[in-house]
Image (cartoon, rainbow, N blue to C red):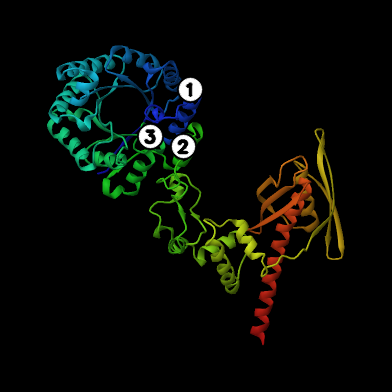
Amino acid sequence: MEERVFVFDTTLRDGEQSPGCSMNVQEKLRLARQLESLQVDVIEAGFPISSEGDFEAVQEIAKTIRGCTIAALARAVKGDIERAWQALQYAARPRIHTFIATSDLHLKYKLKKSREQVLEDAVAAVRLAKSYCDEVEFSCEDASRSDIDFMCKVIEATIDAGATIINLPDTVGYAVPDEYGAMFRTVRERVPNIGKIILSAHCHNDLGLAVANSLAALKNGARQVECTVNGIGERAGNAALEEIVMGLKTRREYYGLYTNVKTEEIMKTSKLLSSLTGMMVQRNKAIVGANAFAHEAGIHQDGILKSPITYEIMTPQSVGIKESTLVLGKHSGRHALKQRYAELGYQLTEEELERAYKMFCAIADKKKEIYDDDLEAIVEAGFTSTEEIYTLENLQITSGTSLRPTATVELRHGNEVLVDSATGDGPVDAAYKAIERITGIIGELKEYSIKAVHSGHDALGEVFVRIDFDGSLYNGRAASTDIITGSVNAYLEALNRALTRKRRQQNSHRRTVKEETV
């Protein structure tokens, strides 16, 4: 029987402690709303006693977010717990999360307290927290380096005092999966009242084992996992939420566990956090890295084109990414090159593809990555020339703050000169509609961008467009000091490419029919 795992997100508390990742109140509130959309179970909103900013952030999140439990951290100290409750009292589902260290190392050097004093403080803290709210989480800080007998004693006593969740953190990332999992198994066996609470895992990544340790804990009875988006956190970070959630989802038959996280919101959440903190995700980061669903090796690309499951254990759509990416580089093969050319609007024959592939390989040996510009340069090198079926003769634009943009376009088509006018949302839109009226061909603008070729008021502007004609995409480029003229010429280049391809296909079909007739 499958069991549910509760996801406790501590990005706004432990994650924010990562150097350079501080967020203001509005930024925290924005991320909290996204975490609610992600459908995490618990948002640890901050550590209210630590600063006025943290207090205000917890308070605002508690007032705003209604779909998640809102937790606030507090040491096993009366003032901390009271301050936490002052911030949390507006929450629909509040939780006070109190903690004290249980390892002899921390007792000796940090707390300078005896085991008896720590036990007494832990029980008193839980009782006080329980007087404020029903949900109380107690953490044995540095659990992975604590004496197991003493820790079991503390756990039993705090459960009796009213704790509903017991967290056993690997505070310094010291544990390895086998021993961390064994710790949970031992606690479940030795603590008589353990059935009354939920066990929680909280792991740091100092040895790169945070996710592995968290999964080991879940395998051994933990049913809450504490993690952060993108794995941010102090030192080497925390267990990454996206890796744990997708690990459980992808290997559901192995773990027999599930979460309620809406995984399609993962990428959006990751990008928002990066935007707010400025901490970018490494390209090869699992699940949310730029390369997570990118393939360059020819063997892999061929497999992906035939069936994505050959080299992808989860779909990009399952984490909110539109599609996989075939990266063209020196390891790419003919199948990927042909696919990319098709996406750019070029249908190459086998002979043309072979010639293009040889040129592609020569360029790829010199460049790390091949861009669409490079591919088009290869094609334009001589074997798929584009005819100038329509050319711009004249363009007149009327536009202003109180005038409806109007364009009059004059095109040459063979020996004919064709003229028409149209209005639009702007001068470029009006010009494009006039071209459609002249040619009778409707295109859907998919991409439009302008960049300056050099600096200054008289800078030459390069316009790039990508247009869908009859379900195929065609690129167009043009450079001009007049952006509207450049936009029209770029559109005409894309249109001419579409018409050239159509003529080539018609001629090929006629040749085939003639040969069959003969």
Q: Position of residue 395 (x, y in %)?
A: 84, 50
Q: Amino acid at mark 3?
A: Thr
Mark before the other along the chain sequence, 2 or 1: 1
Whether residue 447 sits left or right of residue 84 in the image: it is right
**Residue that badge 2 annotates:** 269
Q: Quadrant of residue 151?
A: top left
In the rendered image, the vertical position of residue 293 relative to residue 98, given as above or below:
below
Q: Residue at x 15, y 35 (%)?
A: 186
Q: Quadrant of residue 504?
A: bottom right
Q: Which secondary structure lies at badge 2? A: helix
Q: Residue at x 23, y 41 (%)?
A: 176
Q: Which mark is residue 228?
A: 3
**Residue that badge 1 annotates:** 25
Mark before the other along the chain sequence, 1 or 3: 1
Q: Position of residue 51 (x, y in %)?
A: 41, 17
Estimate how packed mark 3 is, as few (under 14), some (14 to 19) or many (20 or more) residues with alpha carbons within 10 Å. Answer: many
Q: Quadrant of the C terminus?
A: bottom right
Cα gap from disc 2 to disc 1, whole angstroms: 17 Å
In the rendered image, the vertical position of residue 306 relative to residue 464, given as above or below:
below
Q: Amino acid at mark 1?
A: Val
Cα gap from disc 2 to disc 3, whole angstroms: 11 Å
Q: Nearer the viewer, mark 2 or mark 3?
A: 3
